[in-house]
Image: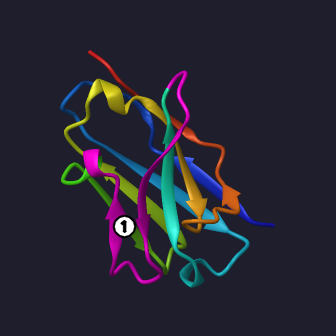
Amino acid sequence: EVQLVESGGGLVQPGGSLRLSCATSGFTFDDYTMSWVRQAPGKGLEWVSTINLNGGRTYYEESMKGRFTISRDNAKNTLYLQMNSLKSEDTAVYYCAKGRYAMDYWGKGILVTVSS
């Protein structure tokens, strides 16, 4: 059974940092591109970032470039998202997903709240 479990969310002040993790199981992690997607309150899904199989290529939504860093540890089957300089508009539920254009498995999501 494929499982993706996010952790590391919570409440952070504007300008602060958080590191999200996504522990995976049930598939060969290093055979797949992985992504982060978010959904702000009352809004639709927004793609955040994608990383290729070996972590050598990363892609970001424009507003997150320079603030967010996606990475992966294939030995631990884990995906990460380091988020710095957080803004109130980054408040959302963050999901990790298997794949990029066709994300066939998703985690349940983790809430990140940026507020003073």
| Residue furthest out toward the top | 116
Question: Could one spot residue 12 in this view of the protein?
Answer: no
Q: In this view, does 85 lie to the left or right of 61?
A: left
Query: Is 84 located above or below residue 24 in the figure?
Result: above
Determine crowd level at label 1: few under 14, some 14-19, many 20+ residues with C-alpha closer than 10 A.
many
Residue furthest to the right in view is 1
* Picture mark count: 1
Q: At which x and y percent is residue 38?
A: 49, 42
Label 1 SS: strand
Asked if the stretch drawn in magenta spans residue 84, the answer is no
Task: Choose between 105 and 29: the one closer to the eye.
Answer: 105
Q: Quadrant of the N terminus?
A: bottom right
Determine the image quadrant of residue 101: bottom right
Image quadrant occupied by the C terminus: top left
Position of residue 110 in the picture relative to residue 60 (left or right): right
Residue sitting at x 59%, y 42%: 109
- Residue 83 picture location, percent across and down: 29, 46
Name the residue: 33% across, 27% down: 89
Displayed quadrant of residue 113: top left
Residue 100 visible in the displayed image: yes
Give the residue drawn at x 54%, y 82%: 30
Colouring scheme, one of rainbow, by chain, secondary structure, one colour: rainbow
Say left or right for 17 vs 55: left
Q: What stretch is highlighted in magenta?
A: 41-63
Q: Name the residue under label 1.
A: 71
Residue occupying the point 57% across, 78% down: 32
Given residues 101 and 104, the one toward you in this image is: 101
- Disc 1 residue type? Ser
- Residue 62: x percent and y percent? 28, 51
Front-most of 56 and 116? 56
Residue 69 x %, y %: 29, 58
